[in-house]
Amino acid sequence: MAATIFVLNGPNLNLLGQREPEIYGAGTLADLEKRVAAKARALGLTADFRQSNREGELVDWLQEARTGADGVVLNAAGYTHTSVAIRDAVLACDKPVIEVHLSNPYAREDFRQHSFISDIARGVICGFGPLGYDLALDAIADITRS
Ligand code: DQA
């Protein structure tokens, strides 16, 4: 059976294409999901895309991943830099979680240079725009096969 990967996007990523396009690009979230769905198909994975502006909903989905997914690609957006609750949910998830960012937070404001997720994620990919999600799926495909 194809492995199921939750692709979770956090707050304000519903505004991709409209929000700070000089940082996040001109493509919409729908464009991103279309691209990543094609990548998932090519890798024989099933991608389940979800976006929320609510911290608790992201926590709920990470908990759901304990039994409902084989891995998670997580762009927690602004919550990356603030959320102990999302960190705890990643720790509880028991599945490989790959942290992804479209931009490179380390080339931005100081407050973006701390992540509550990076040190407990299986890996971190940032700065490559939508390609980062494809790279995360490559990594998860490799991990779930081994
Ligand atoms: C982001 C980077 C975060 O610092 C920011 O708050 C976001 C998006 C990214 O994908 O580059 O909303 O996660």
Image (tube, rainbow, N blue to C red):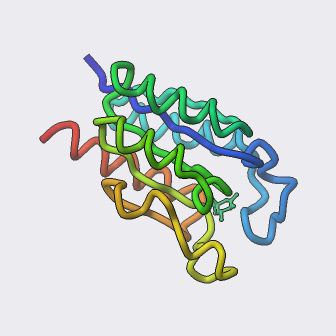
Instruction: Write the residue at 42% across / 36% down.
Output: 40
> Residue visible at 36% across and 54% down?
121
- On screen, 12 above or below 123? above
The quarter of the rendered structure image containing the N terminus is top left
Location of residue 131 in the rendering, given as x and y in whole percent from the top left corner: 52, 58
Q: Quadrant of residue 94?
A: top left
**For the point 58% across and 35% down, which residue is it?**
58
Q: Is residue 94 above or below residue 2?
A: below
Farthest residue, direction top = 1
Q: Nearer the viewer, residue 100 or 116?
A: 116
Instruction: Please identify the quadrant where the C terminus is shown.
Output: top left
**Location of residue 80 in the rendering, given as x and y in whole percent from the top left corner:** 58, 57
In-image side of 47 versus 119 (left or right): right
Image spot of residue 128 (x, y percent): 54, 67
Q: How many marks?
A: 0
Q: Is residue 92 left or right of residue 114?
A: left
Q: Residue at x 54, y 27 (%)?
A: 60
